[in-house]
Image: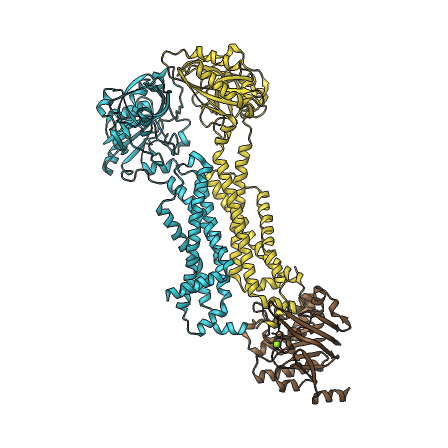
Amino acid sequence: MFSYYLRLAWISILRHWGLSLLMICAIGLGIGAAMTTITVNYLMSANPIPEKSAQLYYVQLDSWDVNDPFDDGLNPPDQLTYTDSTNLMLAKQAFRQNVQTQAFGVIEPEDPEMLPLIVNGRANSADFFPMFNVPFIYGSGWSNKSDESKEFVVVLSKATNDKLFGGADSVGKSIKLEGNMLRVVGVIDNWQPKPRFYDITTGAFNDSEDVFVPFHLIADEKISRSGNTNCWKPSGDGFQAFLASECIWTQFWVELKTEQDKADYQQFLNAYVQEQKQFGRFQRPLDNRLSHVMQWLESQEVVADDAQMMMAMSLMFLLVCLLNTVGLLLAKFLGKAPEIGLRQALGASKRTLFSQYIIESACIGILGGLLGLTLAFIGLKSVESLYGDYMKGLASLDTNMAISAVVLALVSTILAGLYPTWRACNIQPAQQLKSQ
Amino acid sequence: MLETGLILRALARNKIGALLIALQIALTMTIMVNAIFMIQDRQQQMQRKSGLDEKNSFYLTNTVFGQDYNIQAHLQTDLHTIRNTPGVVDAIQINAIPLSSSGWSMALQHEPGEDKDAVGTAIYMVDDHAINSMGLTLVAGANFQPEDVELRKEGQSTWPAKTIITQAFAENLYPDNWQSAVGKTVYISQTQPIQIIGIVAALQAPWNGWNGVERSMLVPFQRESKGSYYFIRTEAGRRDELMPIIEKTLAESDKKRIIRRVTTIEDTRERSYRQHNATNKILTTVVITLTLITGFGIVGLAIFSINRRTKQIGTRRALGATKGQIMRYFMMENFIISTFGIIIGCFGAVALNMWLVNTFNLSPISFQLVAFGVITLFIVGQLAVLYPARKAAMIAPATATRTI
Amino acid sequence: MLIMKNINKIFQTADIQTHALRDFCLQVNEGDFVSVTGPSGSGKTTFLNIAGLLETFSNGEFLLDGEDVGKLNDNGRSRMRNEKIGFIFQGFNLIPDLNLYDNVDVPLRYRGFNAKERKFRIEQNLERVGLASRMKHLPSQLSGGQQQRVAIARALATDPRFLLADEPTGNLDSEMAQSVMSLLEDINQQGTTIIMVTHDAQLAQRAKRTIQVKDGKVSELENISRQHNQAIA
Ligand SMILES: Nc1ncnc2c1ncn2[C@@H]1O[C@H](COP(=O)(O)OP(=O)(O)O)[C@@H](O)[C@H]1O
Ligand SMILES: [Mg+2]
């Protein structure tokens, strides 16, 4: 019976090919637009580290101006002062802790023929690597001990290692960064979390860094800092004054295994701030936050407004396309009223008629879905080329999304077909003979 | 308006079909009006002048890596070299590039003190060549003198005594009379006095999405920094020719630094507004496709309903309807449905706009835009139904007797 | 008065030419009641369509009320249909979406009468066919005979000089057919010229004059009604 309905559907689609084409195009365009924007949103809001996103917490302390609160008092500042992160580091109250900032510098290759290399760097603590599950091809991150003894070490990205050492195992070798000789302890495999959750203050979709160096190199002025700095109180002259100032420029992550650990850490933070209040700091009411990865991404609105707006638009677009389809299917099915009357006269039950017309809708849905998939593919390609770097890697269809596209098309077309089908099934054969 | 009543009654017998078209029109209108609104909003942003001589300017980054490097001395020779290159109008060292999306900001206040209101501004550290190099227009006061320019050490917290600000900033500080800003002393970094000596017509901040993008200030500082920008303005038409020459000259003059990112201001603008451009293109595509889909939907439905009503139309013709009357019937029918849809669409457009205003801080749409949407959709509806209506008018009167 | 002289109608289809009317000549006088019979496919509907200005003819001359129909353009023919001709179809051809009142209203709208005039005519004619009480009903709520009566009311609403009917009783049972026929006779009595195509010999006999169409040509049949008609004249 199913194949009979399929054949009927096919005949009907071909018979009214113009109308069918219109419906398939409408659904295809709707699905294409919706899938394009859904994919971008989905990738933007993806969990970059699903295996432990709920155990990694970003720390915020409200150290800001009482007279002019940060973010109008809605949220505490998005970074910490150097003073606070160093204190929290020293307290070692979490399973793992990491203080970090963005850095940059020039590498002078040993080979005098090679041009110097400007690199983006990250200055971070030893725990950065195990905390964020950073994959290594050679060696590993440095140890907490080497942080304590302020060793001059460095971890290279795969690309940097390729450039400097032709991809060979460089562990144990040295590089000259900003005049400092740093010993290579590890080389990271390709690693590009999307979003780059560990530092969204400098761009949630930026590339991960070329080199990773110990944070003490920044504090000791061996390498230059980049990234955002925000101050509410003038600091004195010189770098030491800057380090002691109320300027925020460091990010602080902790890894906490259980809810209990989190509660304990929260308590510790509150106690810490209470203690600091005695020095005249932290004059705002207590507002210390621990946000796990997804909460942090959410609160920083990593999904771009544009992307969300487009998604809203494209869903409405899909709705228009579906209304279009409902209208056309209705016209088509009601146009078949005489045929339906006849089929009923020949013994078709409502159920059989229902199956026949739902299958016809589904066929159109699948064809529309396939067209939509193609259009989504083209859509994503053009989004990628239009937005350039900004959307790099955010515009690719995986199998999940491809299947969702077809399923979405199928489901929505069947939904669109329900009412016309219901109307078609309820045509009175007697009425039909009379009015014609 | 001959048959309005009749059409309404006939439509009432086929409510769902009419409602579907009306809803489509309503949604299309909702999306169209808001999309066009967003496009216009972005276009307006993109059309704002940066204040620079964009066509003839470029910049490059100078990154020093050598140890024990006399930055100050090299800066002077670099500037001297560039300024004396034939074809160069002028050049400066600067800490940030307008529209480039990274820069420095500070706040100025009328009175000193921690708890006083302050107005945020972008800050450009330049010397007395800035106005000439950037192609700015001084509209009040005076330029810096060479002796005003101070050397700024890394991490220095004090500021020079003089500043030049943009007119928009002056208007913000002195709403009653912006020209009166000249000569006034304001406070930077909460407590340090700084005197406004001049006002330039326009100079945008580096962040195009900031609502204070028109507020900038120039301070006479030359930076002793390992990384800085050189901003260069050339004679008209000579930019592209001079870019590689200057890059090469600088790179070769001294190997202890890297010259990178030699970029025109036009490229910077393009990159700065790339997202805007992309979003606009996508929105335009959405609006066009949507309108087409709705239009073709109307065509499809109309053709279908006309096919279904062939005998009825033939009968009308037999009863004396002229071709024009048949056409008018269908045009009128579409007009009535469109009116319905457009009325709902007006509410929809405003509602969606309200949501956008609340969620994304957009401004409210204008009446003109809604009016534009209304007219466009009426036209789209009438155009879409034109072909089917003509088809209906061509139905032979004899159909009345020939079809059973 | 309707005068057709040597009317020819040729249907041109892809492969064949059908000569539906050949040198068709006929004169129908004011107040006549002509029934047209003939075998299926002989050209009766074609004749009626041409008489009713629904179709154009290939060549020949056709005068309706002294006006040369061949010279009229499409709009002129529409106007003429509306003003001078009423139609009754075998399949009733009521507009299913409109109720009886609005159905009768259709030709009046095209004529451009004002609302009061239209209302008066609609009610008068629905009264005449005995359906005034069902004005708000839809066609699908009526029996076939009733539907045909509505069609007749609609045809009469514009006070046409000619009433053309193509198998008006073809879809009705004999009782209904008789009642529709009586209605037509009534109407003819009141002065409307009627041309009716039918294949029912008995009904055809009730007309004043009967013609037969065969292979696109007319042949007059003498009958009692005709003699009776002439006697009066
Ligand atoms: N539109 C048309 N195209 C081609 N042939 C037609 C058309 N209409 C009628 N005919 C042909 O013209 C002839 C006369 O038809 P018609 O007047 O309908 O016959 P009747 O009404 O007497 O049964 C028939 O042979 C028919 O096939
Ligand atoms: Mg016939």
Choose between B327 and A384: the one closer to the eye. Answer: A384
Q: Is residue A233 above or below residue B41?
A: above
For the N terminus of chain B, the image quarter is bottom right
All told, the count of numbered labels is 0
According to the colouring, which chain is cyan? A
Q: Is residue A38 above or below residue C39?
A: above
How far across and how far down the image is residue A336, in percent? Answer: 49, 66
Choose between A189 and C187: the one closer to the eye. Answer: A189
Visual colour scheme: by chain
Could you say which quadrant of the image residue C16 lies in?
A: bottom right
Q: Residue at x 40, y 29 (%)?
A: A70
Say if residue C168 shows up in the picture.
yes
Choose between C48 and C169: the one closer to the eye. Answer: C48
Q: Is residue A77 left or right of residue B276?
A: left
How far across and how far down the image is residue B160, in percent? Answer: 47, 14
How far across and how far down the image is residue B357, in percent? Answer: 49, 40
Q: Is residue A20 left or right of residue A233?
A: right
For the C terminus of chain B, the image quarter is bottom right
Q: Is residue C65 left or right of residue C17?
A: right
State the hue of chain B.
yellow
Which residue is farthest left? A145
Choose between A165 and A247: the one closer to the eye. Answer: A165
Determine the quadrant in which ligand 2 lies. Answer: bottom right
How far across and how far down the image is residue B184, in percent? Answer: 54, 17
Say if residue C159 shows up in the picture.
no
Could you say which quadrant of the image residue C154 lies in?
A: bottom right
State the hue of chain C.
brown
